[in-house]
Amino acid sequence: MAKKSIQAREAKKGLLVEKYRVKRVALKKTIKSSRDFEEIMAAQFALAKLPLNSNPVRHTTRCQQCGRSRSVYRKFELCRICLRQQLMVGNVPGGKMSSW
């Protein structure tokens, strides 16, 4: 089980990513499409001024049940451990638990 503070920090990062997504995409588009050196440098400077945690790369997916950050399946939003538990109980629709 992940600490509540870490889960809150990740939620905060998610909000920052959503808040600055449009601005970040517009600046990156300006950098890629422009031929004017000054305009490119201004856009890069503005991009660097954005908060670091607004970068989508810094936002990690976490398990909805326990908060684990590693081995999270995007489709179910569960880590491998919680997914296995849910499959054993039968709570995951369309999932079969294989055991031999």
Image (cartoon, rainbow, N blue to C red):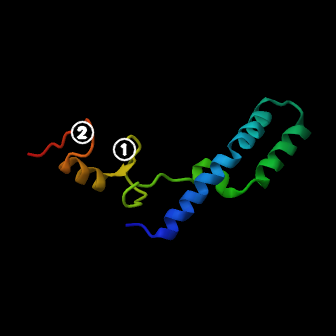
At x 36%, y 44%, the residue is 76
Rendered location of residue 33, percent (x, y):
79, 29
Say whether marks 1 and 2 touch (CB < 8 Å).
yes
At x 25%, y 50%, the residue is 86
In which quadrant of the rendered view does residue 63 lie? Answer: bottom left
Q: Secondary structure at mark 1?
A: loop
Query: Residue 6 vs residue 41: left or right?
Result: left
Residue closer to the observer: 92 or 52: 92
Up-down relation of residue 95 to residue 78 (above or below): above
* Quadrant of the snapshot with the N terminus: bottom left
Residue closer to the observer: 74 or 32: 74
Tag of residue 38 = none
Residue type, numbered disc 1? Phe
The residue to which callout 1 is attached is 76
Residue reaching furthest to the left: 100
* Quadrant of the snapshot with the C terminus: top left
Rendered location of residue 34, percent (x, y):
83, 31
Q: How many marks?
A: 2
Q: Label 2 crowding class (10 Å Cα cut-off): few <14, some 14-19, many 20+?
A: few
Query: Residue 35 vs residue 91: left or right?
Result: right
Residue type, numbered disc 2? Gly
Q: CA distance from mark 1 to mark 2?
A: 10 Å
At x 23%, y 54%, the residue is 85
The residue to which callout 2 is attached is 95
In which quadrant of the rendered view does residue 52 lie? Answer: bottom right
Q: Label 1 crowding class (10 Å Cα cut-off): few <14, some 14-19, many 20+?
A: few
Rendered location of residue 57, percent (x, y):
58, 49
Query: Residue 7 vs residue 15: left or right?
Result: left
Rendered location of residue 11, percent (x, y):
55, 58
The first of marks 1 and 2 along the sequence is 1
Q: Secondary structure at mark 2?
A: loop
